[in-house]
Every structure is written in structure tokens, then in C-alpha cells.
Amino acid sequence: MKTTRVTIHTLRQMKERGEKIAMLTAYDASFARLFDEAGADVLLVGDSLGMVVQGHDTTLPVTLEEMAYHCRAVVRGASRAHVVGDMPFGSYQASLEQGVANAAKLMKEGGCHSVKLEGGAVHAELVRRLVSAGIPVMGHIGLTPQSFHQLGGFKVQGRDSGGRERLLADALALEEAGVYAIVLEAIPSDIAREITETVSVPTIGIGGGVSCDGQVLVSYDMLGMDETFKPRFVRRFATLGQTIKDATAAYVSEVRSGTFPSDAESFAVSEKRAADPQLYSTVAAKK
Ligand code: KIV
């Protein structure tokens, strides 16, 4: 049976009904399929892939071509979730024309269903242009990792004088420009609550407290892939880093001792089968 795709309209209805939105980052087809089957509503192909997949210290080096590559993989893995492609640093800041051309490229080549960009009122005109070109946009305010050097690091935002007013003004400017949702990253919970109660579009928090209309986490953090990394707003729902290391150590040991592979995991010429089953199945075949 074909599943119904989550759309930007579904997300708006979820806010209206008071149903929380569960969003996760995804970077490849296998994880996308698992997150999708487990019920995630939105999969963000975040430029956080620069850190958790590519091993950089910031998201800044990620290119538009790399984002499109990962978007294509995630779209292949997800049947129900809405897939958002992150506009990487330098792909929309130079001019409105650059932003529109690159967002269209990401939608066309990445196959994502909408794009996300960082920044508030300063990008309102770009959001307006994108929306009128038929490109749904998710905003992102608070801690905006692409401004790492400007912000002086990954720090909670909005605590300085005027911080609350600036965040509220940014959220309102984005809403007025036509975003369908806004990510609120690393801001005090009471500011996130005020924004959530003020704007009509869903807010998705990451370090924004429980009042947001939805939550997002970097999937690698939520799955506990890195035992050394746990910011306060992250909850580890698994400790996959340790599980992967344990499984790898067991594999290494069985390869070395010669107990893997067994006969049952090997082929014999004498085995006659009418029709050999397919050895490999792909994400596409599972759909
Ligand atoms: O790139 C990313 O993963 C993000 C989320 C942290 C919201 O922007």
C-alpha cells in the first residue's frame, strides 16, 4: 500500500491540532528508510553532515553538490517523511539571484521537497522570492552554525539585551515572508515558547525546550554514535557507537580465529537450487 507523504500542509495541520512534529537529520538511504519506517515526520538533510559524516569542525566546508548527493540518497530511502535539503554556507548569501538559482538546483538535483536556510529578517526577501518560485522554505534562527565565527562558537543565543526582541522579530519576518516552519536552535525555552505562541507556522526546536511544535536532533547524536559528544539539549536514545564497536570487535575476532564464515555462510557447487534467491536487496527493492 502506498503511504501518504507528509507535506508542508500536514505540518501546519499538526500544529493546529497540537500534534508534535518529530524531525531528524538523515544523510543516506539506509538511515532514511529506518527513520521513515519508525515514524519520523520530517527528515532534514542537514549540513551537519559536514561534521558527522565528513569529519570537519564546522558545517562551513559543505558544498551544494554534496548536499544534492545526500538529498538524493535520503529521498530514495524515505516513503512517508517530508525531506528538507539544507542550503549550505555560501550558496545563498551573495545575492537573491544566487539564492534562488541554488535552491532550485538543490530541489531539481537533490529531489528534496523543500529547503532550509539559516538567518532571520536579513533573508526575508530571499524567502519571498523562493516561495513565489514554488520552493517551500524552512527558516532557522537562534544558533545558526554557519555563523560559527561571527557568533564566536556554538553558544546559546538570545540571552543578551534585546535578544528576545530580535529573535521574535526574526521569526515574524520569516513568517510574513512565507516560511512553512522555523527551526529554533539553542535559545532559552521561554523565548521559544513565546515565538511558538506568536507565529502561525510550526516551530521545531533543537535546544529550544518542550513548548516548540516539534523537535529535531542530529540523528548521530540521538543515536549516541559519538560517546564523547553530548551537549545538554541532546538525549541519547541509543548508544550505537558502543554497539558498533562491540560488533566490530566480535567480527575482527571471528575473522582472525577462522570461525567466520561458517559452511552455512558459504556456497558449495553441489548445492542445487531451482531458482537461487537474490543475494542482495536494495532500498529500492524494499519499497
Ligand atoms: O544541519 C543540521 O543538522 C541542522 C539542524 C541542527 C537543525 O541545521
Image: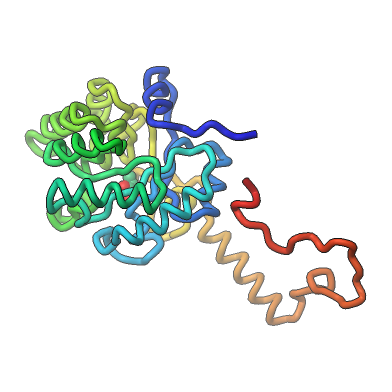
- The image shows residue 151 at horizontal and vertical percentages of 14, 51
Going by the image, does 177 lie left or right of 246? Answer: left
Does residue 28 appear to the left or right of 246 in the view shown? left
Q: Residue furthest left?
A: 161
Across and down, in percent, residue 108 comes to 36, 49
In the image, residue 103 sits, relative to residue 199, either above or below, namely: below
Asked whether the viewer can see residue 133, the reply is: yes
* x 44%, y 35%: residue: 22
Could you tell me which residue is drawn at 54 percent across and 41 percent down?
A: 79
**Residue 282 picture location, percent across and down:** 62, 57
* Residue 61 placement: quadrant: bottom left
Task: Indicate whether 36 appears above or below 261.
Answer: above
The image quadrant where one finds the N terminus is top right
On the question of residue 231 being in view, the answer is no
Is 136 on the left or on the right of 222, as rendered? left
Question: Which residue corresponds to the image point at 26% horizontal and 32% vertical from the top-left?
Answer: 179
Relative vertical location of residue 174 with respect to residue 57 in this rendering, above or below? above
Asked if residue 188 is positioned above or below residue 262 in the image, the reply reads above
Q: Nearer the viewer, residue 200 or 106?
A: 106
